[in-house]
Image: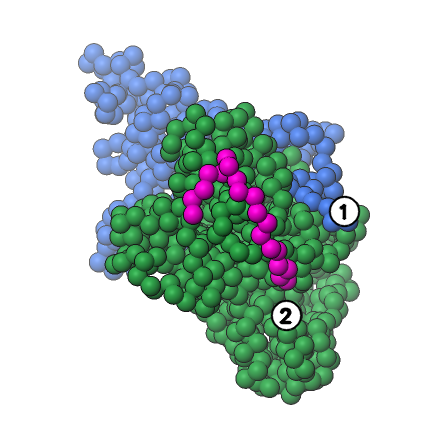
Chain colours: A green, B blue
């Protein structure tokens, strides 16, 4: 089986065409699986496949090498047809060590292909992975197509000319595996070779070793006689344009920066580090040249206060966090409601109450975002549907915040934040302008004198002569904004704050239906469940089912036609990664007997799970 | 331009149209009056002042100042002030807080604001009691103090606000008292002109819940000592006593019998060792006079200066910004 790559026995392996493939690269944290996965992704995108990816990092910072908690993985779904999720189940699992095999095997279906690095299956590593016997020998993998390759040995052999120490050469083995996968799925090596050259510029020996490992893996596919077939995945029909891969958190960063430029107003982002939102802080800290100020605050409350202070001072004030942080920000967000300032809160939701599962995804902050404050304190709530949509949602958040002088909460989640997809880059000229207005005539100025249409109060900023005024958390008198304890005034102001948010329904798009406008079943979703549910609904319609799908990006206020849409179907099903928060809202708001599909395992929906539920309902 | 306009400002320009609603006799009136008196002389136009407060009696302050003002929530004024000052370093931002607001619920923010040397003024009105919630002990109430929430006496050991500020590496730390208006005005003016965090503790008498809290300080000639930069620390009737530093500790000495001013500790506001400022701030009855004045005044780059400097450098390095180009940074590919 082991054959020297220097004397290749040329042969031609037949090629077969497939529509979609899901590969999961898994190994120890130190095996470079994230890099391998992202290189495979980039190459697949460059050759025109549609893609979606999801990394899975260990929760521990440095789990012991070879242990189960130390396994890191990266899943990519690529295809010639519409790809909207990182894929239900891997068709191929690349397991670089026993722990990776053990962690990911339960996710595989029968007959899935498992490619293992046999060199890593040493007694010591098997013990670390808590295997009592070697799964490669004890028959436990009989249900799978196991491809056993001594990757470490073959990699070392390919690099024997290199002067680098053995330990460093061994670290190239992920490129060897990547090369093999490139052969298996008929991908070019050039994009990764280019990347290696650029990334290791000035470290020629390392660049050469990685490039050689990549090529050796590729050649091994052709001559190694391990595979009887290899595969081709055609280009997807993708709109022409310039693309880049973005994660949801990347897209939020870019959306915030774009909003600042579109509004011609500096942006200040204040945040306390928290998983999975910290990447937004890291990202924005790199845009100082755009005038972005980032403040790493002493705590979550401070981050909210700093963002609010910045908004008061005339900046685009924004803070980012995850659920536990949003809970802490509640009181300050209430002050933002009372003072009617345009502040934006990004919540990259994670699983569970309290610390919960910080690296796992969930959508369980919807009610917290809507109601998690004292008193009647309405805020606008938005949620992106896909990683790339985070860009547009960030701009929409600032557009609404500034136009209506209102706090806006954006509910992303760990799945969107870390997941990535190709994003067709918009042209700046096509993006919505954000119209920032500060009053300039002090005559007749009152801090709570509202615009008759939007009900927004004027955004008069400190430093402007003639507009000196005081605001605060005590109830404001209508128009003058003075402290006021009058019962009728409080009733009026409470209603005004509510009406202002409700009125935004006239300034957002109506909800659109994918599928029939009337029918047997409506699937109603929000946030990151879009991809899986949309695909499941499409498949159901292809099977002749009468299934519509409405996806909400605006959660408060709801699109104005939502009630009518809901009444067009026999049944309404609300799939959510929580125990039924949107369903609760829909039932109470529209008196619709909606049912739930509620997955709270820290994992996103699989298409087939939703499809099975649809079948159950029809 | 702005200098010209400020030159004609008077106390009245800083008085808002709102009726002041502190209890008759409250020390807050004096602090308000001195602030309104001092600000016109600083040379900053009125629209550049922002007063930010938390919750408590002191926190009503912004409503009475005819400047920009933000009455925030309990303990959080430093956070909102941080946002304001970072967003617009040109503003003169004043935080008005109290012993409960600043040191209890907002202690964390106070620490970090001072540590960062954010260019704001912090006036901490210390009345050693919770007034607005009607009389519970505060973080500065003395041990054993009987209040509605401590009928058998408080078992909470108090903190000295100025010690806290010095320990947080404050670059300007001072103490004044509501009843000594001239000295208070001097301290406020010094604070207004300081670059960096200016922390001022103001002893403030609560006539309702803790009346006479500072009588022991004010009623005796040797109850207080006024710190003067560069001068030996003397106090008492006929300047007959002084503070000496011996073996690292402070002690009170009576002048005469061979002890002269040359033996006393010379106060230096810019003393590199903040330990001495800490010791002076910690002096209290019985045994020591309470020190009033500026404990420490040193120059260190402010938070907002460093933020602006990084932005300036980043702009210089990366040049003008174009949104299309910015979106196309990183690995892009084209689908034709």
**For residue A244, side relative to residue B85 (left or right):** right
Measured as percent of width and height from the top left, residue A532 is found at 58, 68
The answer to whether any part of residue B34 appears in the image is no
What crowding class fits label 1: few (fewer than 14 Cα within 10 Å), some (14-19), or many (20 or more)?
A: some
Q: Which mark is residue A479?
A: none
Measured as percent of width and height from the top left, residue B224 is found at 33, 31
**For residue B317, side relative to residue B31 (left or right):** right
Look at the numbered discs 1 and 2 and tell me whether their residues touch, using CB distance below 8 Å: no
Q: Is residue A342 magenta?
A: no
> Quarter of the image containing the N terminus of chain B?
top right
Which residue is more in the foreground, B173 or A19? A19
**For residue B104, side relative to residue A404 (left or right):** left
Q: Residue at x 43, y 40 (%)?
A: A154
Which residue is more in the foreground, A26 or A114? A114
Residue carrying label 1 = A428
In the image, which residues are magenta? A1-19
Measured as percent of width and height from the top left, residue A535 is found at 63, 69
SS type, badge 2: helix
**Magenta region's main secondary structure?**
loop
Residue carrying label 2 = A534
Which residue is more in the foreground, A415 or A471? A415
Vertical arrangement, residue B230 with respect to residue A203, above or below: above
Mark toward the start of the polypeptide (1 vs 2): 1
Q: Nearer the viewer, mark 1 or mark 2?
A: 2
Measured as percent of width and height from the top left, residue A75 is found at 51, 55
The answer to whether any part of residue A221 appears in the image is yes
Q: Quadrant of residue A293?
A: top right
Q: Residue at x 53, y 42 (%)?
A: A9
Q: CA distance from mark 1 to mark 2?
A: 29 Å
- The subunit letter for the residue under badge 1 reads A
């Amino acid at each position: 089986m082991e054959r020297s790559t220097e004397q290749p026995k040329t042969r031609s392996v037949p090629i077969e065409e497939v529509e979609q493939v899901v590969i999961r690269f898994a190994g120890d944290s130190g095996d470079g699986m994230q890099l391998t996965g992202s290189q495979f992704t980039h190459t697949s995108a460059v050759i025109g496949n549609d893609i979606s990816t999801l990394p899975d990092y260990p929760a521990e910072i440095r789990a012991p090498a070879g242990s189960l908690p130390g396994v890191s993985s990266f899943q990519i779904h690529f295809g010639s047809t519409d790809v909207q999720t990182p894929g239900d189940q891997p068709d191929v699992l690349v397991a670089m060590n026993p722990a990776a095999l053990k962690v990911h095997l339960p996710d595989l279906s029968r007959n899935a292909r498992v490619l293992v690095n046999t060199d890593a299956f040493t007694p010591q590593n098997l013990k670390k992975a808590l295997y009592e016997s070697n799964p490669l020998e004890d028959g436990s993998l009989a249900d799978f197509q196991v491809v056993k390759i001594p990757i470490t040995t073959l990699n070392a052999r390919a690099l024997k000319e290199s002067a680098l120490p053995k330990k460093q050469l061994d670290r190239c083995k992920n490129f060897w595996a990547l090369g093999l996968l490139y052969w298996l799925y008929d991908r070019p090596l050039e994009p990764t070779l280019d990347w290696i050259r650029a990334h290791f510029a000035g470290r020629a020996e390392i660049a050469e070793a990685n490039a050689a490992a990549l090529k050796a893996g590729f050649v091994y596919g052709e001559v190694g006689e391990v595979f009887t077939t290899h595969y081709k995945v055609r280009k997807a029909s993708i709109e022409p344009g310039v693309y880049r891969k973005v994660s949801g958190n990347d897209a939020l960063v870019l959306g915030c920066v774009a909003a600042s430029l579109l509004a011609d107003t500096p942006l200040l982002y204040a945040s306390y580090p928290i998983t999975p939102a910290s990447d937004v802080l890291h990202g924005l800290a790199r845009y100082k040249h755009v005038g972005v100020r980032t403040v790493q605050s002493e705590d979550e409350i401070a981050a909210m206060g700093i963002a609010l202070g910045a908004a008061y001072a005339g900046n685009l004030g924004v803070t980012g966090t995850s659920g536990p942080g949003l809970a802490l920000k509640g009181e300050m967000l209430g002050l933002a409601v009372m003072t009617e300032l345009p502040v934006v809160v990004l919540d990259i939701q994670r699983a569970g109450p309290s610390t919960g599962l910080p690296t796992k995804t969930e959508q369980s902050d919807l009610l917290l975002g809507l109601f998690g404050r004292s008193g009647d304190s309405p805020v606008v709530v938005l949620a992106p549907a896909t990683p790339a949509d985070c860009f547009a949602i960030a701009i929409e958040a600032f557009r609404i915040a500034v136009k209506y002088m209102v706090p806006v909460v954006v509910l992303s989640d760990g799945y969107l934040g870390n997941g990535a997809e190709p994003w067709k880059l918009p042209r700046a000229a096509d993006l919505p302008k954000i119209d920032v207005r500060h009053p300039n005539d002090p005559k007749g100025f009152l801090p709570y004198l509202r615009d008759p249409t939007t009900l927004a109060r004027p955004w008069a900023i400190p430093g402007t002569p003639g507009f000196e005024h005081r605001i605060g958390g005590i109830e404001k008198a209508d128009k003058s904004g003075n402290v006021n304890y009058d019962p009728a005034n409080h009733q009026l102001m409470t209603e005004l704050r509510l009406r202002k948010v409700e009125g935004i329904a006239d300034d957002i798009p109506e909800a659109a239906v994918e599928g029939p406008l009337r029918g047997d079943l409506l699937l109603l979703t929000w946030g990151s469940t879009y991809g899986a549910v949309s695909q499941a609904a499409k498949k159901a319609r292809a099977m002749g089912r009468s299934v519509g799908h409405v996806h909400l990006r605006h959660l408060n206020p709801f699109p104005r036609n939502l009630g009518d849409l809901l009444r067009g179907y026999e049944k309404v099903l609300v799939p959510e990664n929580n125990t039924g928060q949107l369903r609760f809202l829909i039932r109470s708001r529209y008196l619709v007997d909606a049912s739930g599909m509620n997955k709270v395992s820290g994992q996103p929906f699989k298409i087939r799970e939703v499809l099975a539920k649809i079948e159950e309902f029809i | 331009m702005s200098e010209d306009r400020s030159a004609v400002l008077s106390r009245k320009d800083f008085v808002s149209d709102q009726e002041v609603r502190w209890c008759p006799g409250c020390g807050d009136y004096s602090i308000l009056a001195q602030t309104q008196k001092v600000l016109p002389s600083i040379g900053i136009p009125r629209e550049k002042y922002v007063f930010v407060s938390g919750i408590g009696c002191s926190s009503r302050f912004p409503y009475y100042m005819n400047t920009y003002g933000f009455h925030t929530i309990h303990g959080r004024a430093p956070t909102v002030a941080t946002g304001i000052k970072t967003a617009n370093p040109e503003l003169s931002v004043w935080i008005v807080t109290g012993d409960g607001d600043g040191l209890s619920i907002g202690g964390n923010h106070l620490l970090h604001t001072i540590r960062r040397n954010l260019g704001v003024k912090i006036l901490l009105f210390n009345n050693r009691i919770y007034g607005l919630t009607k009389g519970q002990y505060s973080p500065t109430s003395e041990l054993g103090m009987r209040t509605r929430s401590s009928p058998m006496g408080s078992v909470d050991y108090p903190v000295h606000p100025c010690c806290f500020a010095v320990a947080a590496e404050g670059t300007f730390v001072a103490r004044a008292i509501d009843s000594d208006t001239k000295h208070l005005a001097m301290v406020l003016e010094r604070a207004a002109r300081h670059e960096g965090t200016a922390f001022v503790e103001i002893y403030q008498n609560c006539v309702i819940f803790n009346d006479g809290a500072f009588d022991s300080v004010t009623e005796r000639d040797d109850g207080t000592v006024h710190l003067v930069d560069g001068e030996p620390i003397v106090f008492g009737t006929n300047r007959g006593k002084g503070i000496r530093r011996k073996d690292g500790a402070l002690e009170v000495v009576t002048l005469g019998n061979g002890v002269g001013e040359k033996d006393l500790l010379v106060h230096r506001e810019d003393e590199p060792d903040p330990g001495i400022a800490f010791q002076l701030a910690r002096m209290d009855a019985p045994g020591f006079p309470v020190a009033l004045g500026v404990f420490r005044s040193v120059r260190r780059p402010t938070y907002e200066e460093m933020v602006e400097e990084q932005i300036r450098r980043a702009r210089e390095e990366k040049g003008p910004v174009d949104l299309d180009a910015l979106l196309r940074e990183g690995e892009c590919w084209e689908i034709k």
